[in-house]
Amino acid sequence: MSTVAGATSDTPTPRYRLSQRILHWLMAVIIISALVIGLYCSYLEQGTALRRALLDVHKSLGMTALVLIAIRLPLRLSFGEPANRQPLGTLIHYAARCTHVLLYALMILMPLAGYITSAAGGHDLPWFGLFQWPDVLPLDKPLERVAAQIHEFGAYCLYAILGLHVLAALWHHLFRRDDVLGRML
Ligand code: HEM
Ligand code: HEM
């Protein structure tokens, strides 16, 4: 992240492009909802009507995230990120970069592992009751189990990294009082 030479506190905060900000917050709502519903489902008894209905919503949200990340990643790679007005320090800079890369990796891994779990297990792949996503995998129970384990492990990683990400955003805003949150608003 570079610093804008000669920038003063009167200079407006450089922000991510509008498309990047919209995708960030839209995906944040979708992914946090998918996480909460997925977590809740893991406590419900298998086969109940409530679990099935909630899992349908969960899968629909997750597949939406998969489509959106396919749009968001190329935008990020072509537009990059805005410059920073105040230097962040090497440690914070690399910690933030590392967290963002891991979040991008999980935003791809989680829906893919979820898709493979459902497709290889021969289960439904609904999108909000409107249509079914194509199932491109043959029935494969061992693959279903491996993908489900990756999905579950990925969820633990996401709780931890997302927790850090949100706490870091609050710390920047409330204690460091810098531009970090403003860059995404
Ligand atoms: C951003 C995307 C997603 C996130 C954050 C997410 C998160 C979670 C979480 C936290 C759980 C509960 C923990 C577990 O048992 O694994 C879960 C379960 C599950 N997810 Fe996802 N998921 C996502 C996408 C998907 C997609 C796209 C599908 C399928 C199309 C899917 C299918 C499932 C299924 C079937 C379960 C239940 C697994 C079981 O209890 O055996 N998920 N998900
Ligand atoms: C309440 C929830 C959230 C808050 C307050 C928040 C806040 C922020 C802020 C302030 C930035 C800009 C950081 C910077 O410019 O250095 C950012 C970037 C980012 N956020 Fe979030 N975020 C939230 C949820 C999420 C979720 C759920 C995800 C995905 C799982 C996510 C993934 C990312 C990624 C990958 C970036 C880097 C953007 C880039 O450089 O392309 N965020 N977030």
Image (tube, helix red, strand yellow):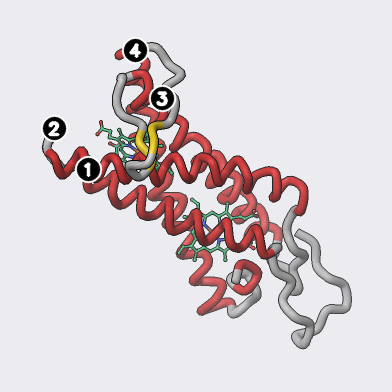
- Extreme-bottom residue of the structure: 10
Mark 2 or mark 4, earlier in chain: 2
Q: Quadrant of residue 142?
A: top left
Q: Does residue 27 appear to the left or right of 126 in the view shown?
A: right
The residue lying at 53 percent from left, 47 percent from top is 103
Residue occupied by mark 3: 116
Q: Is the residue marked by circle 3 packed among few (<14), some (14-19), or many (20+) residues within 10 Å?
A: many
Compared to residue 34, the image places residue 141 above or below, namely above
Closest to the observer: 76 or 54?
54
User: Badge 4, how many Cα within 10 Å: few under 14, some, many 20+?
Assistant: some
Residue 53: assigned label: 1
Kindly state the secondary structure of the residue where label 3 is placed: helix
Amino acid type, label 1: Ala
Q: Is residue 46 visible?
A: yes
Closer to us: 7 or 89:
7
Q: CA distance from mark 4 to mark 1?
A: 22 Å
In the image, residue 23 above or below residue 150 = below
User: Which label's residue is closer to the chain start, 4 or 3?
Assistant: 3
Q: Which residue is mark 2?
A: 47
The residues tagged by marks 2 and 3 sit, at their Cα atoms, a distance apart of: 20 Å
What secondary structure is found at the residue carrying circle 1? helix
In terms of image quadrants, where is residue 42?
Answer: top left
What residue is shown with label 4?
139
